[in-house]
Structures are given as C-alpha cells and as structure tokens.
Image: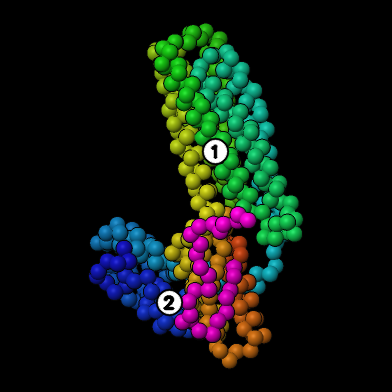
C-alpha cells in the first residue's frame, strides 16, 4: 500500500529522499519521528492515535479507511514501535544477563520435552492395544503416528542436547543450525509416515475387503484409549505452544496434529464399523494427506531458513534505523540481514570520516556490532568500515559451486 496515491504520508518511514533521511534520523529520536509523522496524518487517521499508547493506532476509531489503508498505517506504527525498541537497546547497558532467568527458562523447556516423550511412550502402548482390539486402519494410522512421535521426539531431544554441548574449535560459531536440521528430519519422518498410511488405505479400498465388526467391549476400549490420548495430547499442546523455544514449539505442533489424527481416526473407525466399512480407510486417507501436506510445509520452511533468505523489510528498517543513529556514521552503504538457521546474520557497510584514526574507527565499528547483536533476532553481525561508498560491492555472489576435481 506504500505506492498508493493520495496523502503524502503514504511513504515508508525510511524512504524520504535518501541521504536527507539519514541526516534526519541521526538528528531526531523516534519520538521526533512520531510527532512529525502524526502531525502529517489526515484527521480521519489521527483520531485513532492514542496518546497513552503513542506507538499504537486503534483503527476502530478511524473512519473512511479501506482495508489496505488500515494495514498500511498499522504497519507504519509498528515500524515506529520497533524503532523505540532499538532506542531502548541503546539506552541499556545490555552487558548484564540474568543467568538465573535463562536457566529457569531452559529447565521449563527441557521439562516440556521430557513430559512429551514420556507421554508418547504411554500413548503408543495404549494405541497398540486399541489397534489390536479394533482392527481399524484409521486407528492403525494414529498408532503409527505415535510410534514416529516417539522416534521424532528422540531426534528433537538429541538436537537439543547437541546444541547445548559445543566445541568452539570444531564449531566456531556454535550449533544453533542443528535446530532447523533436527526439525527437518522430524518433519520428513512424519511426512513419510503419511505416505505409508496413504498407500495402505488405498490398498484396502482397492481390495474391497471390509474389516470385521467390533464388539461392544472392543468399542468401549477404543473410546477409552482414543479419548484419553486426545485429552493428554490437547493438554500437552496447550502446555508447549507458549514456549519461545522452536524445538518445544515443534513438539506443540506435533501434539496438535495428534489431536486431529486421534479425533478423525476415532470418528472414521466408529462410523466405518457402524455404517459403511470404506469410511475407515477414507478417514485414513484424509489423515495421510493432512500429514504429508502439513509436515512437507514444515520441511520447506526450515530448509529455506538454512538457504539464506533475506529478512523482511520491516526488520531491515529496524537495523537501518539503529545504524543511522550510531555516532559519526556519515552514510550507510549496505544493510543486509539473512537467515542462517533460526536467527539472522547481519552485514552492514558504513562510511566514516576519512581522517578518523584507526583506533576510533575500530571502536565505532565494534560498538555498532555489539548494538546490532543485542537485537533478539540477530545471531551475529558484521560491520565493514569504509571512507567512501562509491566502490563496487566487496563480495560477489556465487551461482555455482567451484570445481573441486584435482
């Protein structure tokens, strides 16, 4: 919506006439930017700005805005709020880390993983029994899912332990990238399960062989086991989904998926036994397709994070604002941020006064690097110092791997 015609305020906050914008930001804080931005807003938008929450806008109080305009103004105020967060980072020392708080958070994360693994073991045993008693392929699909839950949980637990133990001589920048790799393996196993269940269900439909009817006793066991498994998985999902740890959230996603598979599997098994036998394998096919689509998307998401995809524009604006506010920076040549696992690597090229002594230039660059690495989404920052910005880029982009044949 930034390219729409109309009010002059529909311009990104960091896109005001290039170099003039940099000088403007260095001389003015985020509060000054906000005042200038709000003063130029149309009256129909300004009425939605709350003085008590200066970096938020209540679009419900505005009138006559299209959906696109509402999204635009919300995005601009979100940008201002991110600038405020940057200024708060600059104001704080950032050198003191509450180790007790970090240890407590890690203990909670490990507790969530252990509870999930123990629950998977117990539920697997119960589902094996339910499968034997019912003979339902949909329940069998849910049981195979629990088996792979246990295997995948072991993968994620190994991933977590591997990240904790780092040999800096063998892994100089740590092992945070083990996390997306572990999740990729986890998701690939789950997608493979879905494909196997799909083949089995299709074979049963093609053979046209109805399964035997379940007795009332078998149905009671089936209800008891599957409902218990569903309640346990629902509780684990609620417990794990609020975690900030990506591995624990992977557990949460798996628990949510199990709730879906348990419910669909139970309904398909009961309806297939009561009415038409083909409902059971049809439910298994639905579960299989859901599994394949859901976990394949997880594989792609984490694979892209390892490839080096650029950070979104709002994050680049946040970093650019921080750099422009840094002392003695004449110009900003380049700001790059790209995924290298879960967090971002940031590259910044800045211009400093040519006559500046090396010692002072190094101090400025190092201070800027430390500031950027205070941003929670950043794993590592690299600051390149220069005396002009007219040269060609320092790095070339490879389009193919070098030939390593001797």
Residue drawn 64% across the image and 81% down it: 362
Q: Secondary structure at mark 1?
A: helix
**Does residue 59 appear in the picture of this structure?**
no
Nearer the observer, 88 or 4? 4
Q: In the picture, residue 225 is in which quadrant?
A: top right
In this rendering, the count of numbered labels is 2
In the rendered structure, which segment of residues is drawn in magenta?
381-406
Q: Residues within 10 Å of mark 1 (few under 14, many from 20)?
A: some
Residue picked out by circle 1: 188
Q: Secondary structure at mark 2?
A: helix
In magenta stretch: residue 154: no
Horizontal and vertical percent position of residue 144: 57, 26
Checking the image for residue 33, the label placed there is 2
Comes first in the chain, label 2 or label 1: 2
Query: Does residue 245 appear to the left or right of 165 in the view shown?
Result: left
Vertical position of residue 268 compared to residue 89: above or below: above
- Residue closest to the eye, 225 or 139: 139
Residue 87 rendering spot, x and y as whole percentages: 54, 73
Label 2 CA crowd tier, 10 Å (few <14, some 14–19, many 20+): some
């Amino acid at each position: 919506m930034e390219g729409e015609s109309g009010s002059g305020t529909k311009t990104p906050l960091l896109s005001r006439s290039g170099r003039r914008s940099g000088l403007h930001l260095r001389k003015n804080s985020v509060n000054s930017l906000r005042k200038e931005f709000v003063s130029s807003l149309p009256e129909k938008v300004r009425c939605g700005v709350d003085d008590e929450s200066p970096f938020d806008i209540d679009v419900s109080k505005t009138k006559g805005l299209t959906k696109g305009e509402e999204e635009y103004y919300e995005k601009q105020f979100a940008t201002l709020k991110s600038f405020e967060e940057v200024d708060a980072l600059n104001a704080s020392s950032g050198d003191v880390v509450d180790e007790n708080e970090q240890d407590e958070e890690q203990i909670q994360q490990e507790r969530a993983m252990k509870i999930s693994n123990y629950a998977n073991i117990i539920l697997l045993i119960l589902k094996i029994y339910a499968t034997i008693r019912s003979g339902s392929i949909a329940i069998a699909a849910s049981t195979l899912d629990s088996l792979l839950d246990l295997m995948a949980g072991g993968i994620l637990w190994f991933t977590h332990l591997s990240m904790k133990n780092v040999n800096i001589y063998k892994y100089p920048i740590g092992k945070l990238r083990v996390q997306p790799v572990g999740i990729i393996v986890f998701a690939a196993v789950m997608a493979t399960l879905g494909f196997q269940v799909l083949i089995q269900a299709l074979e049963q439909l093609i053979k046209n062989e109805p399964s035997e009817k379940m007795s009332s006793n078998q149905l009671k066991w089936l209800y008891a086991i599957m409902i218990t498994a569903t309640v346990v998985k629902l509780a684990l999902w609620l417990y794990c989904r609020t975690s900030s740890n990506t591995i624990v959230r992977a557990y949460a996603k798996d628990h949510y998926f199990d709730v879906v598979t348990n419910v669909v599997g139970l309904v398909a098994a009961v309806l297939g036994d009561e009415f038409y036998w083909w409902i059971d394998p049809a439910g298994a096919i639905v579960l299989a397709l859901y599994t394949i689509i859901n976990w394949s998307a997880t594989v792609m998401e984490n694979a892209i994070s390892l490839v080096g995809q650029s950070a979104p524009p709002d994050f680049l604006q946040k970093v650019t604002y921080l750099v422009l506010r840094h002392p003695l920076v004449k110009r900003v040549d380049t700001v790059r941020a790209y995924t290298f696992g879960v967090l971002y690597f940031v590259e910044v090229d800045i211009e400093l006064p040519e006559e500046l002594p090396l010692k002072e230039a190094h101090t400025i660059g190092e201070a800027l690097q430390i500031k950027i690495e205070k941003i929670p989404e950043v794993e590592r920052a690299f600051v390149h110092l220069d005396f002009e910005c007219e040269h060609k880029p320092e790095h070339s982009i490879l389009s193919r791997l070098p030939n390593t044949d001797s």
